[in-house]
Structures are given as C-alpha cells and as structure tokens.
Amino acid sequence: MYDRALQALVKQALEPEWEAKEEPNSYGFRPGRSCHDAIEAIFLTIKHKAKYVLDAEIAKCFDRIDHKALLTKVATFPSLRRQIYAWLKSGVMDLGVPKETSLGTPQGGVISPLLANIALHGLEESVKQYAETLKGGSKSVKRKALSIIRYADEFVVLHEDNSGVQQCQEIITDWLKGIGLELSQTKTRIAHTLHAMPDGTKPGFDFLGFTVRQFPEGKHQSGKNTDSQKLGVKTIIKPADKKVKLHNERIAEVIDAHKAAPQAALIKRLNPSVRGWANYYSAVCSKETLSKLDNDLYSKLRRWTHRRHPNKKGTWCANKYWHTIKNNHWTFAVKARNEDRYVTLCKHADTPIVRHVKVKGEASPYDGNLVYWSTRMGQHPEVKPEVAKLLKRQRGKCAHCGLTFKPGDLWEIDHIQPQANGGGNGYDNLQLLHKHCHDLKTCYDKSGTHVKSPAT
C-alpha cells in the first residue's frame, strides 16, 4: 500500500509534464480521454473517403518494454529515476514464487499505464515524418492524410494508399525495436474500410470492441463530403459481433447462477451489466443490436420462469413476472419488499444513442482551460463541484445571455427562483450566469419585472 501511494505521487509529478507534450492521437490511459474519443477520431478520418487500414497490436507490450530505453525517455532527476528503476526491477510473485523482472513495467501498478505511454511516445511522429515524404500537397496536407490513432498498445494507421500503409508497418516495426517491442503477428493485418482485399480479407476492422466498416449506398442513404456532394458510401460503426456474443454468454451465466434466487436479486445482478454495456456502445449505430439483445434476454428470462414453475402455463408466468409500469409495457419487475415501488430490469434499448464529441487534439486537463474541461467532464480539481456540474448541464453557456463562457470570464451561481420567494438550494433551482448577467437578473427579480432572456 505504501508503494502504491508513492507511485500515485510520482504519477502526479510526471503526468502534467508528459500531458503537455503527448501526441494528439494517443487516447489510452490519459486523463480526459477515452475509447470513444479514439473511435470518433477514426470516424472523422474515414467518413469522407474510404481508406486502407493497418490494424495492429503490440505483442506483450507491458511485459517487454526495455528498462534502459524507458528510463532514458523519462529523463527525470536522479532520485526519482532511481525510484522508478527500483519499481521496474522489484520482481513479481507468480503462484507464490518470486521472479525477477528484467523487462516490462509492473502490471497493475498505479504508474504502469503512464510509463507505457511514455515508452510509446514518438510513435505517431515517426509515422507523420514518413507522411511528409509522400506525393501530393504541402507537408501539413500530407501529414493530415495519413492518420495513426493509438489506444495503449493497440493502434490503427489509415491512408488511401495501400503501399503507404505497408511502408508504415515497416517503419513502426523498426521503431518498436528501439524499446524492445514488436508487433503481434496474429493480431496485425491490413484491410480496407470498403472493399475486400485480394487475399480475401473482409472489409472493415475491429477496434476497442467496435466494428468499423463502410458500405456502398444509394443517393438517399449516402454520406456527404464538406461540399454536400454524395459519396456513394456510408460509414457505420457498431458493436463487434464477438463482444455481443460474449455479453450474451455472461448474461446467461448470471441467469443460470440465480436459478433459485428471488427475482429482485436477479434484477439487481443483471442491471449493472445491461446498463454498463449499453452505455459503452451508446455513441455509435447500436440501436438494432441493443433491441436484439433485449429480445435474447427476454427469451432467457422466459426459460428461467418456466424452469421455476414447470407445472404452470406460460400466461401465468408472464403475468407473475412481467408488469406494466408507467406506460412501459412488459417490464420484468417485482414489487420491493415493504415499499410501494417496483424493482425493474433495465432494457438495453432504453439507453439513448448520443454521438460522442471528440476531445480537442492536444487539449489536456492541465492546460488551464477550466471552462472546456468542466463543461466536458462535469468536474475539475480547480473548479467548485457545483460550478462544474452546472457548466456541464448548460453545455458551457450562460443561462441568461446564451453566450459561451470563455477563459477569464467571471461567473456566479444564481437561484432561478429567489430564496426570498421560496426557492430552494437544489440543482434544479440553480444556474450559472456571467457576473454582469447575474446583476441584471437580480435587478429584474427585485423589481418584479419579467424580462425574457436571450437564451430562451
């Protein structure tokens, strides 16, 4: 526990420095970034043009990082360097047997993801430098045409030229040798987002549990470019089939493990899995998949009820375990004990599909842009919790004038219904205003004049 706490302190010291120089398309294990940012970056890269893709993974990344190369990259002061070196060389316990660690970072350690990102820093730039040698356009145009999007030890390289993607694979292989790593032979392949490859490789690719693929479409369903010209293709990102199958299997295991358990216990065990899985895939084209999962779950639950009551008819089982609650028909639910409410099972399809907004390229929670990060995450260590929550709820805009808050603006929390008139202190009665807008609203409240604000 002491070492874990010490690693957290070291991470707090190193992370701001490395966040200031991390590459823009690195999304794994970084504050303020997520899998959804990586997926949205892929979508923005290919939505206007079909491209070849190098779908790759680094073999045993955390286990094989060269210690000397890593410490050279960290380039910190001697005492901290010695402490990191001690952690790298501390060894591991495998089934009670101590083993030395001559390579890799300690998996499960607080600082391990940061060290892995430091070790892989520079991978994107090496590919971008190669892009500058390609034909067509200025250096900036050529750098933008070739994209590498990385999440921890998985990454994709996207370009419209197959030979360029193949050359990137060779460059990345040589670059990884410098830190003792190599690409996985079984998990690395080259594909095309729209067409099958000559060797039979299917179009599209899987990344972070999502399937990314483009389909030829007619004029009514086709995507458009920035000039509103129809492309003839449409980019679809949806949950990967393997992940859907795995989720179904885990749901079945939970139901089988609760053969004799009360209905409420089964619901409480299923809800976190259903809600968590649906939320993860709620930013892509997953409505059809979520509905199918609900149908499969319903079939499993019907078998669960018939197993419990083999001598009862299906109608009796349905009326006992499914109810109509607040106009929501056919809900798997049970009345809570000693309470006048129902414990209900969540449905996958009830999760709304909302497109994720990608984080700005080189933005970091340490860059001082309090408005942007409070609006995005609903929290920031330098902003009061209630202010950050209101910023996120109002999408970074003043509730009175409707203008976006900018760095340096003065803001104040206002009671929508003044406390003198019976207004409470709950979030439903609070809003964030520019300081001058708050002064104007206070004048209106005191004078009793109702003035419609521009924001409404």
Image (spheres, rainbow, N blue to C red):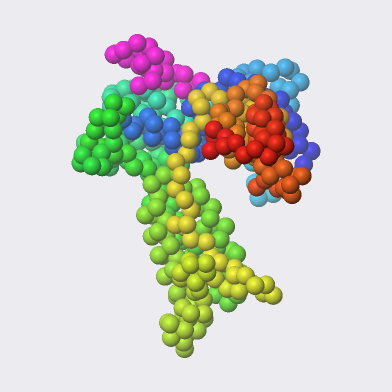
Question: Residue at horizontal 79%, vertical 38%?
Answer: 2
| Residue 189 on the magenta segment | no
- Is 51 on the left or on the right of 393, as rendered? left
Residues rendered magenta in the picture: 121-145
Prevalent SS, magenta region:
helix
Q: Is residue 88 visible?
A: no
Q: Is residue 307 above or below residue 91?
A: below
Residue 130 colored magenta?
yes
Q: Quarter of the image holding residue 56?
A: top left
Q: Quadrant of the N terminus?
A: top right
The x, y position of residue 402, in whole percent, is 55, 32
Note whether residue 361 is visible. Answer: yes
Is 326 placed left or right of 205 in the picture? right
Count of all numbered marks drawn on residues in the image: 0
> What residue appears at the point 44 percent right and 37 percent down from the top-left corner?
39
Name the residue located 21 percent from the left edge and 39 percent from the top edge.
219
